[in-house]
Image (cartoon, rainbow, N blue to C red):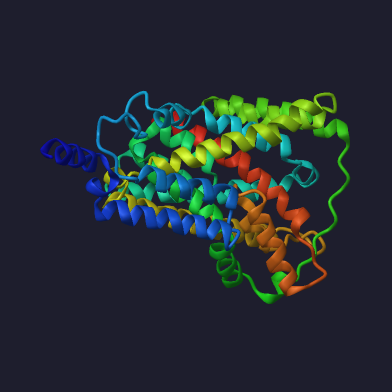
């Protein structure tokens, strides 16, 4: 009988019930909220559902030594997590983003690239605030990139500068990407007048196929020479776009923007979520990171909208820019551009801004990669 009781007690010691703490339960509830928002509210379901389920996986209480935890060397989850920690996944996602991105709006209206550059001020604003709150320069740089609203870039940079903060930074970045409509719309309405929201922009000119092919080559050479440290992200982004626009590598482009990016997105979401174990995630520093990420995102949106208003001071009538597209300077493609379209249609149901907003939106993708390269060059 004692043997049976001892065996049962030993079995009990291995169960999640025996090792569970209130912190595990809190994190599991957070994971369930992510899943709910993805499924019920349709907020970035391709991101929030894998991350939410990953949070649940990572916070199932496990006795040390079973070789199943994401932080236990050579466990299955640990091996999959190497793609995040070593920075393999983000460039592959950028390859897919490049293969599905049409740069025509930016090529036809090159002045709008300045909006994408202005929105990156949120990154450097959050960097300074993080320093004031006591984070090291490397940690502050990794936190600041959240303002670019670009999850893969945030993971890539945090993996290089502050790997111990990667879970909080990645979850924060993806959370605010999902909350783009909620965060940006009130700011846009607050900073613009009714008259400004009614501005109609001239139709973009048609872009030739030759221009579309030349752009990724010239764009890559120019940006890579300026910021060589951004090579992995910029190279894969522009290479993916060249596959799309060349017309002779359709199979490669379809693979990059389809099966490849889907697999990598699933793995990155699941492993990032699993990395948020209660003992390493649930602390005051994570709360600060979430707060700084929100501030960074707000600053980026404000800078984008206000920069358009400043540009309009120097634009002639008929060439003015609707400031509602300023929010699209962040890297959340195409969600922030859709917010520009939605708010614009609310002001004037016949004024479509999506085609214009896509220019600063794709510029923001390039801008966030350049900003990451600058921070990595100075801090890495």
- The residue nearer to you, when weighing 81 against 360, is 81
Residue 330 in sight from this viewpoint: no
* Left/right of residue 149 with respect to residue 169 in the rendered view: right
Quadrant that contains the C terminus: top left
- Residue at 53% in and 31% down: 89
Pick whichever, 130 or 239, lies toward us: 239
Left or right side of 171 for 223: right
Instruction: Name the residue: 20% across, 41% down.
Output: 8
Considering depth in this image, is 101 or 347 the residue closer to the camera? Answer: 101
* Residue 232: % across, % down: 56, 26
- Tell me: 133 left or right of 230: left
The outermost residue toward the front is: 1
Residue at 70% over, 66% down: 342
Q: Residue furthest left?
A: 2
Q: Looking at the image, is 229 positioned above or below residue 128?
A: above
Where does the image place residue 282, in percent across and percent down from the top left?
Answer: 30, 50
Give left or right: position of 242 versus 157. Answer: right
């Amino acid at each position: 009988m004692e043997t049976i009781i001892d065996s049962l007690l030993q079995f009990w010691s291995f169960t999640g019930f025996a090792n569970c703490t209130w912190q595990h339960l809190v994190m599991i509830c957070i994971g369930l909220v992510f899943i709910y928002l993805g499924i019920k509210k349709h907020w970035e379901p391709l991101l929030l559902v894998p991350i939410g389920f990953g949070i649940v996986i990572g916070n199932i209480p496990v006795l040390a030594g079973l070789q199943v935890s994401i932080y236990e060397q050579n466990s299955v989850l640990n091996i999959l997590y190497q793609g995040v920690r070593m920075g393999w996944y983000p460039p592959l996602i950028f390859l897919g983003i490049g293969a599905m991105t049409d740069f025509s709006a930016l090529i036809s209206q090159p002045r709008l690239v300045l909006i994408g550059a202005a929105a990156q001020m949120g990154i450097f604003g959050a960097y300074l605030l993080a320093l004031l709150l006591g984070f090291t320069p490397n940690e502050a740089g990794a936190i600041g990139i959240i303002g670019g609203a670009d999850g893969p870039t945030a993971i890539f940079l945090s993996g290089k500068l502050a790997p111990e903060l990667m879970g909080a930074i990645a979850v924060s970045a993806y959370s605010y990407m999902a909350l783009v409509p909620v965060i940006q719309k009130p700011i846009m309405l607050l900073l613009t007048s009714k008259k400004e929201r009614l501005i109609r922009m001239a139709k973009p000119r048609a872009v030739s196929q030759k221009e579309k092919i030349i752009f990724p080559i010239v764009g890559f050479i120019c940006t890579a020479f300026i910021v060589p440290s951004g090579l992995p992200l910029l190279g894969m982004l522009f290479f993916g776009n060249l596959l799309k626009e060349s017309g002779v590598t359709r199979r490669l482009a379809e693979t990059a923007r389809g099966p490849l990016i889907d697999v990598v997105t699933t793995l990155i979401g699941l492993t990032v979520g699993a990395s948020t174990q209660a003992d390493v995630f649930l602390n005051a520093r994570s709360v600060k990171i979430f707060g700084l990420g929100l501030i960074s995102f707000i600053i980026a949106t404000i800078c984008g909208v206000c920069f358009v208003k400043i540009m309009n001071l120097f634009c002639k009538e008929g060439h003015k820019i609707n400031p509602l597209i300023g929010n699209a300077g962040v890297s959340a493609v195409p969600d922030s551009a859709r917010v520009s379209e939605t708010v614009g249609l609310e002001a004037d149901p016949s004024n479509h801004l999506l085609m214009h907003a896509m220019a600063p939106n794709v510029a923001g993708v390039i801008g966030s990669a350049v900003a990451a390269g600058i921070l990595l060059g100075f801090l890495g």
